[in-house]
Amino acid sequence: MAQLDPVHAAEARLRAASCVHIACAPVRDLIGEDDQDAAYAVQALGIARRLTEGRRVVGRKIGLTSPAVQAQFGVHAPDYGVLLDDMVLADREPLDLARFLQPRVEAEVAFVLGRDLDSPTTHVADVLRATEFVLPAIEVVDSRIAGWDIRITDTIADNASSGAVVLGTTPRRLDGLDLAGVGMRLDRDGAPISTGSGAACLGSPVTAVAWLARAVARRGRPLRAGEVVLSGALGPMVAGEAGVYHARLEGLGEVRADLVGAAEHVLALGGAA
């Protein structure tokens, strides 16, 4: 049987991990630690496969925007992934941890676009004009790579370590909101576990969305009206365990994620762990 090229081999490793629910070795041994073009090609293959299975694209997510999160994983630049319809839940809708391998939780601002953002020179004023409303969000990130042993190409290939997102249900217009100054507190079962602010997200969530708009437009997949954009963590991510996660974002409101059950036991699959 013919050997797969590195991009297809990396996608196959990640796909196998997802299918059998056992984490795999990093894919940087296949595509390198720095080749982001190759990593996004792996991501695109994985998304194309999901679309053929009946899923649909509903938005994008930005990862690694917070210095605290970057420091956790030894990376120094943001990345992005794709949100599919089966990743999005509403406030208080139960989220079964069995669908994840290594869940972690973070709070952020979700943008819902009213206009396309299709220019590779998009700036913050364009984002402000295009945003229909924002929502508080709790993202449950996950990694198909054992032990979260990731570098930038690993997480990009793995769809920016995507998992699921719980969206608040009370929209807020941007008029009068200072998103850079938004304070965030994330509790689990009533106890605070993470705090942060909008300034931790590339200086402002608006700046993060402008970065994303430019990046995806350059790759020929611009942001479209109606899409949900997760703008990135406002503080350190925390372990995802059974319990009630409650995020409060000043000026935006609150969102609750009810995590139930337990994540699957993780072993290493394929390659050197």
Image: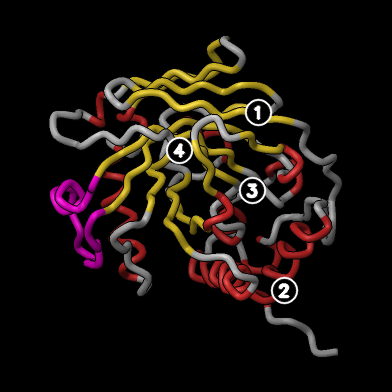
Mark 1 and mark 4: Cα distance apart in space: 19 Å
- Please state the extent of the stretch shown in magenta in the rendering: 114-132
| Three-letter code for the amino acid on which mark 3 is drawn | Ile
Q: Is residue 106 magenta?
A: no
Q: Nearer the viewer, mark 4 or mark 3?
A: 4
In the figure, is residue 204 to the left or right of 186?
Answer: left
**Residue sitting nearer the eye, 93 or 222:** 93
Q: Nearer the viewer, mark 1 or mark 4?
A: 4
Q: Secondary structure at mark 4?
A: strand
Q: Quickly name the residue at label 4.
A: 167
Give the mark nearer the N terminus: 1 vs 4.
4
Give the mark nearer the N terminus: 4 vs 3.
3
| Three-letter code for the amino acid on which mark 1 is drawn | Ala
Q: Quickly name the residue at label 2.
A: 9
Q: Secondary structure at mark 3?
A: loop
**Residue sitting nearer the eye, 25 or 49:** 49
> What residue do we see at 84% from left, 50% from top?
268
Residue 266 x, y percent position in the rendering: 83, 43
Q: Secondary structure at mark 2?
A: helix
- Residue extending farthest to the top is 191
Q: Are marks 4 and 3 in contact (CB under 8 Å)?
A: no
Residue 29 x, y percent position in the rendering: 70, 63
Q: Residues within 10 Å of mark 4 (few under 14, many from 20)?
A: many
Mark 1 and mark 2: Cα distance apart in space: 30 Å
Q: Quickly name the residue at label 3.
A: 150
Q: Quickly name the residue at label 1.
A: 239
Q: Nearer the viewer, mark 1 or mark 2?
A: 1
Q: Residues within 10 Å of mark 2 (few under 14, many from 20)?
A: some
Residue 72 x, y percent position in the rendering: 57, 34
